[in-house]
């Protein structure tokens, strides 16, 4: 799967260094996966959920929420936001 963009992962890891290894693991796992649909994705990543037409990944023991738009037919994942659990709970990401 092509992930757009890794730059967002790196920027978040700069602000929250304790998340770097978890984000790197998520990236490597998704990079090698080519799920055809959400069911296949969920088999490999059971902490993924569908919310408001997007996919939300719980990363690092639920410390980080990564919100993405997945286009299975094109094998592309667009990172919309990376948030701490507290930022996610505020819900402002839904307004974008």
Image: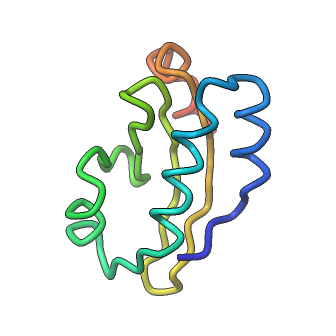
Q: Residue at x 41, y 80 (%)?
A: 34
Q: In the picture provided, is 78 more to the left or to the right than 46?
A: right
Q: Position of residue 57 (x, y in %)?
A: 41, 44
Work out whether residue 19 or residue 65 is closer to the camera in this orientation and state it: 19
Protein image colouring: rainbow
Residue at the image point whose x is 68% and y is 23% from the top: 16
Q: Residue furthest bottom?
A: 73
Instruction: Using the image, determine if residue 4 lies above or below residue 49.
Output: below
Who is closer to the viewer here, 64 or 28? 28
Q: In the rendered image, which quarter is residue 45 located in?
A: bottom left
Q: How many marks?
A: 0
User: Residue at position x 50%, y 29% from top?
Assistant: 64
Left or right of 75, for residue 57: left
Residue 63 image position (x, y, % from top left): 45, 23
Task: Give the answer, above or below, for where 70 lies relative to 86.
Answer: below
Please provide percent x and percent y for residue 7.
79, 52
């Amino acid at each position: 799967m092509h992930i757009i963009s890794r730059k967002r992962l790196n920027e978040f890891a700069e602000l929250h260094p304790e998340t770097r290894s978890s984000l790197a693991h998520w990236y490597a796992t998704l990079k090698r996966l080519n799920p055809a649909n959400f069911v296949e994705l969920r088999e490999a990543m059971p902490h993924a959920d569908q919310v408001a037409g997007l996919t939300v990944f719980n990363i690092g023991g639920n410390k980080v929420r990564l919100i993405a738009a997945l286009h299975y037919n094109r094998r592309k994942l667009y990172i919309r936001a990376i948030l701490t659990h507290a930022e996610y709970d505020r819900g402002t990401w839904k307004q974008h």
